[in-house]
Image (cartoon, grey):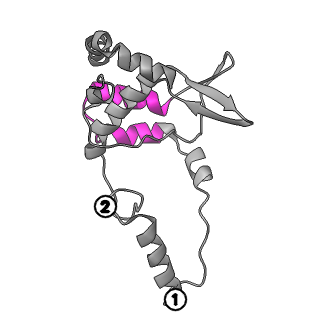
């Protein structure tokens, strides 16, 4: 993406002011942009916001509880173990049928204020909490029209254990 290249190119000048802005609590996420191509549409964060959200995800991940039944988490077995458990339960006569999960409907009905209330128990850092709260209450810009989804899927981030500043450090 073009903005990512610009961010990488100007990283030496932007790193310290960005870090200061973040630590002072003055950084604000921009509305997500609606992008369209070939009849498809999707929303996307700008490169700078994606970097800040990656930083937040890396810091928050070890602070949050990880229930053993959340198979999608690393080290919890994934879909292979989950499917094997379902097959075993069906074959053993424990259950007669399986309900299909409406995952989009599940995420569409997340109560944002409840998420924020639960996060207060785990995230003590006010800077990190502020960024996460902005993420939960994200807004979208579509052709000059701005809106904030009230009950909507929270856009996900994949995390790896990497220093956030290394994500845009100049390539050698």
- Viewer-proximal residue, 11 or 129? 11
Label 2 environment density (alpha carbons within 10 Å; few <14, some 14–19, many ≥20): few
Q: Is residue 9 above or below residue 122?
A: above
In the image: residue 40, left or right of residue 95: right
Q: Mark 2 points at which residue?
A: 75
Residue at the far right: name it. 39
User: In which quarter of the view is residue 62 placed?
Assistant: top left
User: In which quarter of the view is residue 43 placed?
Assistant: top right
First to last magenta residue range: 113-137
Q: Name the residue under label 1.
A: 91
In the image: residue 152, left or right of residue 88: right
Name the residue: 46% across, 66% down. Answer: 79
Please say whether residue 151 is visible from this viewpoint: yes
- Quadrant (top left, top right, bottom left, bottom right) of the C terminus: top left
Which numbered tag is attached to residue 60? none
Which SS class for mark 2? loop
Q: In this view, does 152 lie above or below 80?
A: above
x then y, percent, for residue 141: 62, 21
Please say whether residue 29 is visible from this viewpoint: no
For marks 1 and 2, the one nearer the N-term is: 2
């Amino acid at each position: 993406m073009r903005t990512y290249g610009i961010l990488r190119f100007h990283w030496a000048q932007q790193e310290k002011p960005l870090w200061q802005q973040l630590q002072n609590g003055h950084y604000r996420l921009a509305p997500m942009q609606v992008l369209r191509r070939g009849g498809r549409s999707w929303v996307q964060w700008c490169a700078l916001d994606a970097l800040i959200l990656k930083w937040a995800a890396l810091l928050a991940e070890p602070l949050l509880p990880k229930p053993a039944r959340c198979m999608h988490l690393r080290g919890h077995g994934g879909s292979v173990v989950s499917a094997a458990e379902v097959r075993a339960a069906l074959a053993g006569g424990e259950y007669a049928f399986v309900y299909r999960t409406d995952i989009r409907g599940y995420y569409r009905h997340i109560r944002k204020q409840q998420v924020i209330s639960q996060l207060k128990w785990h995230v003590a850092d006010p800077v990190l909490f502020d960024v996460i709260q902005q993420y939960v209450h994200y807004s979208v810009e579509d052709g000059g029209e701005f809106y904030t989804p009230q009950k909507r899927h929270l856009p996900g981030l994949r995390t790896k254990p990497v220093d956030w500043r290394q994500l845009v450090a100049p390539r050698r």
